[in-house]
Image: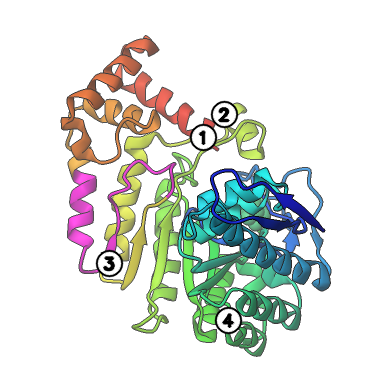
Amino acid sequence: MDTDGEDRGGSARYRAVVTPGFEQGPIRPPSEARSLLVRVVRNCPWNKCAFCPVYKRRKPSSRPTEDVLADVDAMAAAEEEIRRGAWAAGRGDDVVAGFRRARRDGAVPDEAAQVALFLVAGGRSAFLQDADPCAVPAAKLAEIVRRVRERFGGLERVTTYARASTLAKRSAEDLRMVAEAGLTRVHVGLESGSDEVLERVKKGATAAQQIAAGRKALGAGFELCFYVMPGLGGRDGSGEHVRGTAEVIRAVAEAAPAERPLVVRLRTTAVAAGVPLWEEQEAGRFELPDDVETAREIRDLLERVGDTRLVLVSDHSLNLLPELEGDLPGDGERLIGVVDEFLALPEEERAAFAMGRRIGAYWTLADRGDPARRAAVEHAVGALGARTAQEILAAAAELRSRFV
Ligand code: SF4
């Protein structure tokens, strides 16, 4: 369908083409915030993880191949229209202006905002949704990946979430087929490498499956990213959580080729109201470690992975220390030093820093030296009416859980 585009402020008249809508899933990893989002399956076929609020009460389903391919085509059409909108607005390389114009003219659907974000970021990455696209037949997934690559020629990476139990069941040939079609990276929610903790949070995977999944993914040629959740073992299971997680990381990292080291991303545990882990917490059977205890846990993990070669990333908003990024083992001492710097602060300063992170006033430890940021934190702590460092830490932990 065509619609007349007005020419307010633009240098050329144009006829806006109304492009079709497409589906978008609810989440993507932080590193894929500006990726093209392609919904291959809906929701989560497992849906039992005790800490996860995302798909509860939503039914999983696999989308017909032709619907997913049509979505990819619709996104490509939206891209074209956004670019035409930019030219019509007289700002040929301004994606934002192009999107605004195309939206105003009713040419692109609301969800094309993600296409615009993707274009602003250079159009280099796509992410397949929702929780476990690798559960669909390999030939179907490969066809979808090929279409994405065909329609968006500038892509440098195409990534997806994958459950460890799914990858562990996949044949090496199937995984290679998908890798050859152009899927470059899998994000796996490891969460913990301890069987005890995995069982307790109903992850539906064992440490042995995680190791098999990780090695298979690397063997097929994918980049592999493990999400680890500091704090997930609770206060009582912290040591076991660290021990098992370090073991799985070491076992998988040693199978990674030099050019594709294992990437470990931290995603600190938070307990959203209503999830099964929250019920455990309310019943007194789970205690969420505070930020100081979590920092000690991360320090233990860094020590236990020792000389393992991996890339550590701390890009989740729930993390206390975004500075914990680097290449191990080379950066190991520096990273432990960052944790130690935090742990060496006086008790009240540690609590204030935790609160500062949760209210968005602090990013790095050095931000404590900024008078305006410090004043904002002092104001927030004062408004709490909390008297002790422990009370401030407890309030910060509660704020963390409200982020989810
Ligand atoms: S597998 Fe992932 S999406 Fe599914 S319930 Fe667990 S954490 Fe949530």
What is the CA distance from the residue labelled 4 to the residue labelled 2? 47 Å
| Nearest to N terminus: mark 1 or mark 2 | 2
- What residue sits right under mark 4 in the picture? 182
Q: Indicate left or right for 215 with 259 as reference.
A: right
Q: Can see residue 167? A: yes
User: Residue sitting at 49 percent across and 69 percent down?
Assistant: 124
Based on the picture, tell me whether residue 326 belongs to the magenta stretch: yes
How far across and down, in percent of the image, does residue 263 sit? 40, 67
Please name which of the two marks, 1 or 2, marks the residue nearer to the observer: 1
What is the CA distance from the residue labelled 4 to the residue labelled 3? 26 Å
| Nearest to N terminus: mark 4 or mark 2 | 4
- What residue sits right under mark 3 in the picture? 327
- What residue sits right under mark 1 in the picture? 403
How far across and down, in percent of the image, does residue 48 sit? 70, 50
Q: Of the residues shown, which amino acid type is indicated by label 1?
A: Phe
Which SS class for mark 1?
A: loop
**Residues at discs 4 and 2 in contact (Cβ within 8 Å):** no
- What residue sits right under mark 2 in the picture? 284
| Nearest to N terminus: mark 2 or mark 3 | 2
How far across and down, in percent of the image, does residue 11 sit? 54, 54
Seen from the viewer's position, the closer of residues 135 and 19 is: 19
Residue stretch rendered in magenta on the structure: 316-340
User: Residue sitting at 22 percent across and 39 percent down?
Assistant: 365
